[in-house]
Structures are given as C-alpha cells and as structure tokens.
Image (cartoon, rainbow, N blue to C red):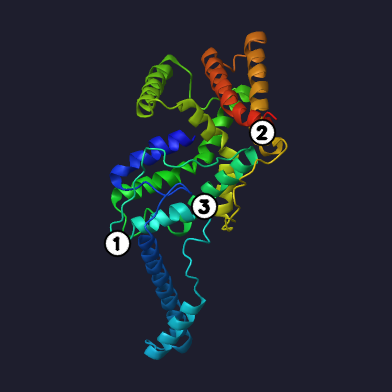
Amino acid sequence: EPKMFYDIIQRRRNWVNASFCCGAGSIHRRDAVMEAALKCYADNIEQQVEGKSKDLQKLTGENTLDDGLVSMVRHNIAQEEEFTPYRFHVSEDIYTSLMLHSDEGRNWKSVMHPAVESKMLSPQDLLSWSVQRFKYAGGTLDIARNDNPVFRKGLSMGQRVMYASTVWSYLGGVWNALFLIAPLVYLFTAIAPVSAYTADFFIHILPFLISMELAFMMGTWGIAGYRSKASYLSFFPVNLSAIWTVVKGEQIKFKVTPKDRQEGNFLYLVWPQATVIGLTALGLLYASFQYFALGNDSYSLGGILVNIFWGLNNILALSGIVMASLWQPEQ
C-alpha cells in the first residue's frame, strides 16, 4: 500500500537517518553517489587482491609476495572489475542508500519529504505488480544474504534496526503461509494450534488483539490499515518464491516493470490464493456440519467460532487479489 509505505514506514525513519531510495521518485547528490561508488570499487579490488595473494602464497609456499607482483595483480583486477556498483543489482535503489548511509566519515543524510513533488505510474495490472514485488523482495533478501546491513560497517544502530526490519518484512511469507494454513488444519482435522479454546485463552488473547489494533490505528491514523494488511497477506506466494530463489543462490534477474497495462486475466498468478480461499470455504462447511449436524465432539464451540472468524478473515483478505486478477479497465 503506497500511502502506508511512504507516509508511515519511510517518513518515520527520518529521525534515525534511515529512509531509503525506492525508485524514480528520489533525488541524489551526484558527488555523494560517485564518491561512495569509488570507495566500493576500491574496496572490492582490495578484497580480490587479498584473496588472489593468499592463493599465490599457497601455490608458491612463500610468506610474502613481491610488491611488483601484487601491483600487477591489482592492475589486472582493476581492469576486469566493472565500475558499476549499483547498476547490476536488481535493488539498486535501496542498495545505493545502504552504501551512502554506511559511508564512514561523510555522514550523508537522507530525508523522506511528506509533500508530493512528483507523480508516476504504479503497476496497472497484476502481472506488473507481481514482477515489481518479486524484484523488491528478492533484491532485498539478496542484499541481506550477500551484504547484510545488520553487520555492515558504518551504519548506526538505528539504521541497522531499520534496514533489518525491511529485510524481516520480506521473510513474512513464511509465517503468513502458516497463518493461512492453521485454520485449515483445525477445520478438517479438529487439531487446534493452541492447547484449548477456553475462557482463559480468550481472556488473554482478546486484550492483546484489541490493544494491538488500537496501537496500529493510532500509529497509522488516516490510512486504511486493513487494506495494507490484506495486501501483505496476499503477497505470500511471491514472497515465498523470492525467499526460495535467494536460498538456492540464484541470481535475482532484473525485469523492468512494465509501464503499459498488460492485457488479459491473470488467474494463473493467483492460484495459491484461490486454492486457500476454496479450501477454507470447504473447511468452514465441513467443520460446521461435523459439529452442528453430527455432534462431533472432537470440535469445540470456541474452536469452531474462532476458526470460522479466522477463515472468513483470510477469505476476505485474499479475495481482493483474486478479483484484481480478473479486473479489466472500462473502455
């Protein structure tokens, strides 16, 4: 949800100088970007020289290498190394900000301005949206795997926490999938995710849920909170695909987000969400029939009510993206 991202997540990072570039709607100081790029270029060369030198020492059995040989190795590596530290990473925007924030001694500042200064096209169809979201998720997780901001030199503690929260959000596909599967397990098998749906359970869970929703509402006042949560929950297949791609060590390929609307329906993109909706609806009917019609005492009234509410919430949250796959603009 753009308003949630820009007005809440990005803007609330200004106080620790951790708002980051997220595409075309940003302005950079050219000398800041070039200076950070040069430092990165030099660091990469030195790391490769160190690695090559160790390999040569093992090969020759010598404790030290001739300065002339080291200079020649450095020259060859410099000729081969591309001076393009940002261009070939799928998430060059956030990676650029990460490099600038960690540029020791320069203390570059980044600010998310709340005023609208430019307007650009968002994805006009589900295919474009999926391409963009996979790129965001895969690129961010790839950075975490290969150049983790939590351990990167030059960042303040606040910046580390903020970058870590961004990475953490893209791991959400794992627990979102569990959140969607849990009611299905109960509805079809009567195996509950908690020991018992007793009065003690509700006494503890309800105040927590209510206080969490109130806190969320106050922190995001004026922005549709449920829409953002539904979008995040619906994102789970793309998110899991990005996680698996990074875990396998595959390169996140750069696919430019289409600027024109792609024609046709995109039901093939939402079959996981549609499957969850179908299974949940079937599970609601099955469990209700087992408990109310057949008197199956494996189920409990509390468990039935909680999981009916849980399942209906999941159906409502996922139905938006399924409907979006069929949406066609008016001619």
**Residue annotated with mark 1:** 104
**Quadrant in the picture for the C terminus:** top right
**Considering only order in the chain, which callout, 2 or 3, is on the residue closer to the N terminus?**
3
Name which quarter of the figure residue 325 lies in: top right
Q: Position of residue 224 (x, y in %)?
A: 46, 26
Report the side of 223 relative to 301 (left or right).
left
**Considering only order in the chain, which callout, 1 or 3, is on the residue closer to the N terminus?**
1
**Residue at the spot 47% in from the left edge and 80% down from the top edge:** 55
Q: Secondary structure at mark 2?
A: helix
**Residue at the spot 58% in from the left edge and 49% down from the top edge:** 244
**Residue at the spot 51% in from the left edge and 77% down from the top edge:** 80
Amino acid type at mark 3: Gly
Q: Is residue 17 above or below residue 124?
A: below
**Residue annotated with mark 3:** 139
Q: Position of residue 184 (x, y in %)?
A: 61, 27
Q: Position of residue 211 (x, y in %)?
A: 36, 22
**Considering only order in the chain, which callout, 2 or 1, is on the residue closer to the N terminus?**
1
Q: Position of residue 292 (x, y in %)?
A: 63, 9
Q: Residues within 10 Å of mark 3 (few under 14, many from 20)?
A: many
Mark 3 or mark 2, whichever is nearer to me: 2
Question: Real-space Cα distance between discs 3 and 1?
Answer: 24 Å
- Could you tell me if the residues under marks 3 and 1 are in contact, i.e. CB atoms within 8 Å? no
123, 51: nearer the viewer: 123
Amino acid type at mark 2: Ser
154, 315: nearer the viewer: 154
**Residue annotated with mark 2:** 325
Amino acid type at mark 1: Glu
Q: Residues within 10 Å of mark 2 (few under 14, many from 20)?
A: some
Q: How many marks?
A: 3
Q: Is residue 80 above or below residue 113?
A: below
